[in-house]
Image: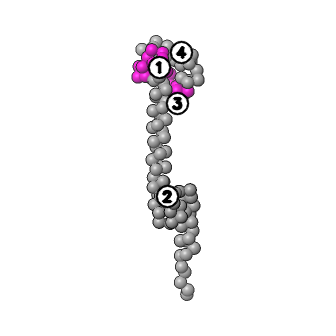
Amino acid sequence: MARIKGALATRKRRNRTLKLAKGYFGGKSRLFKTAKEAVMKSGQYAYIGRRLKKRDFRRLWITRISAACKANGMNYSTFMNGLKKANITLNRKMLSEIAINDAAGFTALTEKAKAAL
């Protein structure tokens, strides 16, 4: 029987990697070995970035809420404690949206939080 060579599978694998490396600078988009390294590293960065995105957005929401609280004569931690005691369960994303788009609504929330303390 004739020996089957793996040229087709190898070419397919290399083309898949080179396709993922499209747009990279220099040899990283044309040479298989450097493209493979760049694609692996970019995959790691993407994986890490998906986790960092969650942290970054939470930090942003907290900063926005804190700024709005200070405008209403309160700090962030007492505001959140007051909301918890008043049984108001809004997540930080929604609180930051209220703080940006509905200042009167946020002021009402701070008053309820102050009353619950």
Q: Position of residue 18 (x, y in %)?
A: 55, 63
All told, the count of numbered labels is 4
Which amino acid type corresponds to the residue marked 2 in the rendered image? Val
Front disc: 2 or 1: 2
Of the 4 image quadrants, the one containing the C terminus is: top left
What residue range appears in magenta?
A: 68-97
Residue designated by label 1? 69
Looking at the picture, tell me which residue is in the foreground, 49 or 22: 22
Which amino acid type corresponds to the residue marked 1 in the rendered image? Cys
Which amino acid type corresponds to the residue marked 3 in the rendered image? Lys
Residue designated by label 2? 39
Residue designated by label 4? 108
Front disc: 3 or 2: 2
Residue at image coords 56%, 56%? 23
Of the 4 image quadrants, the one containing the N terminus is: bottom right
Disc on the earlier residue, 2 or 1 = 2
Element type where label 4 sits in the image:
helix
